[in-house]
Image: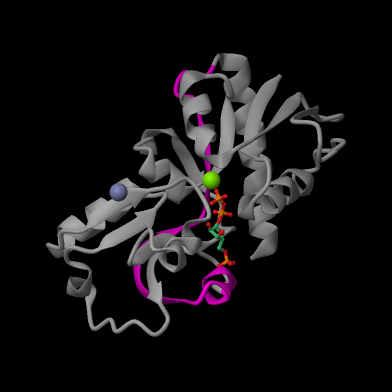
Amino acid sequence: MIRLAIQKSGRLSEDSLNLIRECGISFINSSLKLKTEATNFPLEILFLRDDDIPGYVADGVADIGIVGENVLVEEGREELQVQKLGFSRCRLSIAVPKNEAFDDITALEGKNIATSYPNLLQTYLSGEGVQAHIHTISGSVEIAPSIGLADAICDIVSSGSTLISNGLREVQTVFRSEAVLIAHQNLATAKQQLLDQLLFRIDAVRKAQK
Ligand code: PRP
Ligand code: MG
Ligand code: ZN
């Protein structure tokens, strides 16, 4: 039995479940259960918060996982990556209140920026030679400017509708991301064989989509 961790609810959840189904794996999915077993493949699926997935896979609590590259790189766990999956593409971007002037990134010098991705943002700002105060919050980042918590935000943008709904304007992309498959680094032989079978099926699914 191999244990796969996927996001419980969020941008990656539906795409992750679809990939498993397209691999010909059946399971019963009730939104309240946080764990389910496939009926025709030795696979157990755990539904977790995406931020927790790299840590669980690194520790071997889960054998494999599907997570955004944004989370993986933010947490410094790139060594777990097995392959990119080509779905749930998004970008990590800086946004400011829509009527705020913004000529270039130096406009952020000395400003407060709210984000859930302090490491990715710091790397970007350092590369640009800009010093800002990074305020780390774990969610609802888009609300920060309107409640006076920050001058700008840095968060995940997919369709862009969350930014628009909160009166924000995207001004700079910091990082581009997509879903990736990750695996524990010392899988037992039997689990490695199951992972190989899974990778073979994923490869076939992706070829059929092209
Ligand atoms: C991101 C981000 C926004 C949303 C943006 O959340 O925090 O809430 O997606 O998408 P949109 O541009 O299509 O409106 P994510 O699903 O990554 O989940 P999390 O922040 O709760 O982990
Ligand atoms: Mg999250
Ligand atoms: Zn702060």
Q: Quadrant of residue 5?
A: top right
Q: Is residue 156 visible?
A: no
User: Which sits in the foreground, 25 or 7?
Assistant: 7
For residue 160, side relative to residue 80 (left or right): right
- Residue 27 placement (x, y as % from top left): 84, 35
Does the magenta segment cover residue 48? no
- Residue 28 placement (x, y as % from top left): 87, 36
Eyeballing the image, is 149 above or below 200?
Answer: below
Eyeballing the image, is 34 above or below 86?
Answer: above
For residue 55, side relative to residue 204 (left or right): left
Write the residue at 62% across / 55% down: 11
Give, as a single range, the part of the protein colored magenta.
161-187
For residue 120, side relative to residue 133 (left or right): right
- Residue 20 placement (x, y as % from top left): 73, 43
Q: Quadrant of residue 100?
A: bottom left
Work out which residue is located at the far left of the displayed protein and give it.
129
Q: Quadrant of the C terminus?
A: bottom right
Q: Quadrant of the N terminus?
A: top right
How many marks do you count on the picture?
A: 0
Does the magenta segment cover residue 174? yes
User: Which sits in the foreground, 52 or 139?
Assistant: 139
Write the residue at 45% across / 39% down: 81
